[in-house]
Image (spheres, helix red, strand yellow):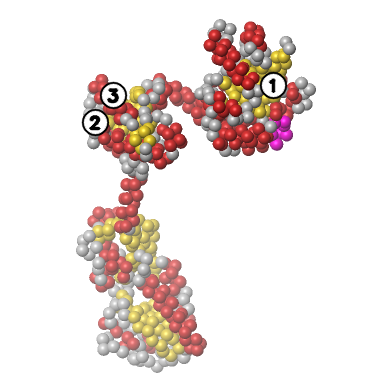
Amino acid sequence: MLKEIQTIVENSGTLIYVIDLSTYEILYANKKCKELFGDILNKTCYKVLQRGQNKPCDFCPLNQNETPANSLPFGSLYKWENENTLNYNNYMFVSHISQWTDGRKVNIQFGFDVTLQKELEAKILKEKDEFIETFKTIIDSTLEGIIIYDENKKCIQVNSVITNLLGYTELEMINKDALDFIAPSSKSYVKSVIKNHNQEAYEAQMLRKDGSTFPAMLRGKDLKILDKVIRISAVMDISELKIKEKENLRLAQYDHLTGIPNRLMLKEIFPNLSKRIKQNGHYGALLFIDLDYFKTINDFKGHTIGDMILIETAKRLKNILRETDFIARLGGDEFIILINTKNSIKNIVINNINRVSSKILKEIRKPYLIAEHDLRLTASIGTILFKENDNLDELMKYADTAMYSSKEKGRNRFSYFDPKLQQLIEEKIKLTKQLREAIENKKLVLYYQPQILTQNGESKIIGVEALVRWNDSKKGIIPPNSFVSIAEETGLIIPMGRWILKEAAEQLKEWENDLEKKEWRISVNISHKQFERESFVQIIDSLIKEYDINPNKLRLELTENLLIKNTEETLDKIKKLNEMGITLSIDDFGTGYSSLAYLKQLSIHELKIDQSFIRDILNDSNDFSIVETIISIGRKFNLDVIAEGVETKEHHEMLISMGCSYFQGYLFGKPTIPSLL
């Protein structure tokens, strides 16, 4: 606001001066006036602005009324043209009756020099109208209510927006104190804020003439004119904004799908609940509920069905809980229930929570009849009892730990938090962090275990299986069974798996210069998370091209459970891998949910017999039959069959007699570094 006023008033090429209507004394003149007429401040206007004029100008419309000029109403606006008798220039004038900072009624007059523009009347009129429009914008802002105060914070000018907002007339607002328009609840705050010369936008309650209040956004700025400091204050009604904010907050605190409170609301109400529990010495209970296998239903039945299940679950939970119990949905299929047991005897509390938990499990087990589907679900519940603990995040972590304990015990049950279990989880978190650092800092190494072909009584190495190890500076070499499962759970298997493939490709390239090893292939285990990534085939193709290796020397070992899905995406990926020259093996064949139908649809090259079947093959008829069947299947489908875990000569001979030709195990060599092969 300051910049606009300074630009218009001081730097404008327009004559701008202020005349006291009682004395005709010039109170202010801008630079343009002084350039044309000299030092005219504090002099009589008609004497210094006209030649030989000794009385108020009769051509001035302010003097053409029956009412004296100093009695004309505030806000009066006059326009006229006149030829100045001093410089003989033609001017178009605009006068506005207003009140000066000291209370005097004044004429704020603008003069446009139109001498050279008479022939361009239309252009002049347009310029005049634009200026008048600008002037009106300053006086009557259409965006915000404007109140101009003097140095004593008394109102000296307002616009129509603020009069409409507050319900006053312009004259009623003049001379009122700034705090007269502020509601009592905000006066103390506003009183401290307006002491600042420039106020950043702030909120306060405004007071209307009728006594009603409304929320407003205010901002103010001090402006110096004619050695007088005035305050320009802008006011914006934010009633609608506050209503929307309140509604948005309500929406933000409730789950949009189920209509029950969400995590935000849970955090809002928990402090008061925990405070009451602590004061009364009672127990509180936090139940963490997770639907079992919900993701499977969501994936196979679709998200619409999944959403309907969640809505129905929320209804069921609400129906069995008391009004004083609190339920929230965290997201996905996770729900939280907070209970103030209002009891301080632990055994009684546990019995009551057991009944509630059993009731919840029973309710979830009831059929979900949704869109002609009869769906059966169960839930896992984890519970933490608390008295003094008011850390919600910590309690949720403990309850989550107990919930996962329920899942590990078989699901469809409830468990209480066990500190020992939490210790195991924290150790797993620590191990995950260390594993991530090991991957980033290249602390993993690849060991290779020979794979043997026995023909005509002679055995030779035809390839190796790449097996990852973790070379820890403190613990030494860590075997894969200590960290691969964690890598799977956390997703670290993706960067780890990519590193293994890269190392294997480098090794194949290095062996191309070795007369014996250049014929070897390398088998690499592929996680289902790796394989299911959209970029998997592209990664394999890039490695082959980057290292310029023979793709037939790279064999990928896939799990039976991955292949049995037999999805279009799986078939497409395997087809592309085959076209690239990659061979595929089914790892631990016979241990998954077998369905031999996929063997005739997928281009597989090898079956691996899991070592659990080999271990007791000499004295367990069931294991013998399983191995014999797998070898027979391999023969019928023209697949290589390799036996893992061959540790003794007797195992080797028995497998040969059964028709097996490929072997891997400690009998032929333990996993080792490449240089020792």
Q: Amino acid at mark 2?
A: Gln
Residue 377's x, y, as percent?
A: 37, 30
Residue on which the image places disc 2 = 279
Residue 455 lies within the magenta run: no
Residue 563's x, y, as percent?
A: 56, 29
- SS state under label 3: helix
Give the mark nearer the N terminus: 3 vs 2. Answer: 2
Magenta residues, as a range? 543-551
Provide the major secondary structure of the magenta segment.
helix
Quarter of the picture holding the N terminus:
bottom left
CA–CA distance between discs 1 and 3? 57 Å
Residue on which the image places disc 3 = 354
Mark 3 or mark 2: which is in front?
3
For residue 85, say whether it is visible. Answer: yes
Q: Residue at x 27, y 58 (%)?
A: 214
Within the image, what quadrant is residue 178 found in? bottom left
Q: Residue at x 41, y 89 (%)?
A: 82
Q: In the image, which disc is placed on residue 347?
A: none
Give the mark nearer the N terminus: 1 vs 3. Answer: 3
Q: Residue at x 36, y 79 (%)?
A: 108
Residue 124's x, y, as percent?
A: 47, 83
For residue 353, say whether it is visible. Answer: no
How crowded pointer 3 is (Cα within 10 Å; few <14, some 14-19, many 20+) is rated as: some
Farthest residue to the bottom: give it: 52
Quarter of the picture holding the C terminus:
top right
Give the mark nearer the N terminus: 1 vs 2. Answer: 2
Residue on which the image places disc 1 = 463
Q: Amino acid at mark 3?
A: Asn
User: Along the horizontal axis of the image, is 249 left or right of 595?
Assistant: left
Mark 1 or mark 3: which is in front?
1
How crowded pointer 1 is (Cα within 10 Å; few <14, some 14-19, many 20+) is rated as: many
